[in-house]
């Protein structure tokens, strides 16, 4: 049993060592876009794959209501010994443009986690009491809740403008009034009671569906879990080694799309149809 756990953790370390992306989104026409952290791919409605944004290192993606795609490009500048970034937009007419200039450091005061009003959400990790911050259209900041979290990982805004996040391996929901609800506890491993460098990336992307179910990519266990509105847990997807899920979405027709990373940092997408057929892209 200890050997098996070691193998699973080693595979997770290999995959997350290059910080795989969680970004996978679907536009209103049914086209899917995803990142492999070197470029952005499109899977069109016929299933054809193509590169739409080359040479960008982005972990997250965002689609606005007009099907414009947003991401970042992050790189290490050896001459200055610093990281740098810019934010880009890929419009529906195929035009790529920078919308922020090259900037030293990591992305700050900008987020790809947004509600339908255009408010952005990010985690303030500068103190032991980690909190979620909202940045509105006028660049004004406010705390979403007074609640202190231990280790905020990925975040997501639902179709009803509720905020989902993972706090280490607990699944959290925050409503529009700032009320915090713990949907599920220790969803990766019940024996892990403390976040460490080795286990903090056990859970990656979070998303929902039209019925209000919540999904999480539990990379450490190579599976996707679904939680209904009562918090009932169900495993809805498993993938064998060397693959593990990092992100996903549910289409309007109920198909489950999963972004996966391998132990050697390869990336692929699987679709689980409503009749349980698996299609690999």
Image: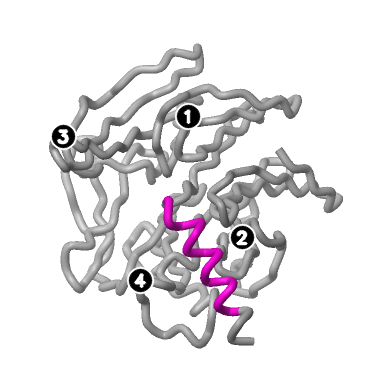
Mark closer to the chain start, 2 or 4: 4
Mark closer to the chain start, 1 or 2: 1
Q: Identify the secondary structure beneath mark 2.
A: loop
Q: For the point 61% across and 82% down, which residue is it?
A: 3
Mark closer to the chain start, 1 or 3: 1
Relative image position of residue 165 (x, y in whole percent): 42, 62
Work out how far the residue at label 4 is from the one at label 3, CA to CA, in angstroms.
29 Å
Relative image position of residue 5 (x, y in whole percent): 58, 79
Few, some or many residues within 10 Å of mark 4 (<14, 14–19, 20+): few
For the residue pair 17 and 259, the one nearer the viewer reads as 17
Q: Which residue is mark 2?
A: 213
Relative image position of residue 81 (x, y in whole percent): 16, 42
Q: For the point 55% across and 37% down, which residue is it?
A: 34
Where 194 falls versus 12 (above or below)?
below
Work out how far the residue at label 2 is from the one at label 4, CA to CA, in angstroms.
30 Å
In the image, 193: left or right of 188? left
Work out how far the residue at label 4 is from the one at label 1, CA to CA, in angstroms.
37 Å
Give the residues in magenta. Answer: 5-18
For the residue pair 158 and 69, the one nearer the viewer reads as 69
Q: Which residue is mark 4?
A: 197
Q: For the point 57% across and 60% down, which residue is it?
A: 217
Queried whether the magenta region covers residue 15, the answer comes back as yes
Q: For the point 42% across and 27% down, which residue is it?
A: 55
Mark closer to the chain start, 3 or 2: 3
Foreground mark, 2 or 4, reads 4
In the image, 103: left or right of 119? left
Work out how far the residue at label 1 is from the one at label 2, CA to CA, in angstroms.
22 Å
Observer able to see residue 237: no
Mark closer to the chain start, 4 or 3: 3
Q: Which residue is mark 1?
A: 65
Few, some or many residues within 10 Å of mark 3 (<14, 14–19, 20+): few
Q: Which residue is mark 3?
A: 79
């Amino acid at each position: 049993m200890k050997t098996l756990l070691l193998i699973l953790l080693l595979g997770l370390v290999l995959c997350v060592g290059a910080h795989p992306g969680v970004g996978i989104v679907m536009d209103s026409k049914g086209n899917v876009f995803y990142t492999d952290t070197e470029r952005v791919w499109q899977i069109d409605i016929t299933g054809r794959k193509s590169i739409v944004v080359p040479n960008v290192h982005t972990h997250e993606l965002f689609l606005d209501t007009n099907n414009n795609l947003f991401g970042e490009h992050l790189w290490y500048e050896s001459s200055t010994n610093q990281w740098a970034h810019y934010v880009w937009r890929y419009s529906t007419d195929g035009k790529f443009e920078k919308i922020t200039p090259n900037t030293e450091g990591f992305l700050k005061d900008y987020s790809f986690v947004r509600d339908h009003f255009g408010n952005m959400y990010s985690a303030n990790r500068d103190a032991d009491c980690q909190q979620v911050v909202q940045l509105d259209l006028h660049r004004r900041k406010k705390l979403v809740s007074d609640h202190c979290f231990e280790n905020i990982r990925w975040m997501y805004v639902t179709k009803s403008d509720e905020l989902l996040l993972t706090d280490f391996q607990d699944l959290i929901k925050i409503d529009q009034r700032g009320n915090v609800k713990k949907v599920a506890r220790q969803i990766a491993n019940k024996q892990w009671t403390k976040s460490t460098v080795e286990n903090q990336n056990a859970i990656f992307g979070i998303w929902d569906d039209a019925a209000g179910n919540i999904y999480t990519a539990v990379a450490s266990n190579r599976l996707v879990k679904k939680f209904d509105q009562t918090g009932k847990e169900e495993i809805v997807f498993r993938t064998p080694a060397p693959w593990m899920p990092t992100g996903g979405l549910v289409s309007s027709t109920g198909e489950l799309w999963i972004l996966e990373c391998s132990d050697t940092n390869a990336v692929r997408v699987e679709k689980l149809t409503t009749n349980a057929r698996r299609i690999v892209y």
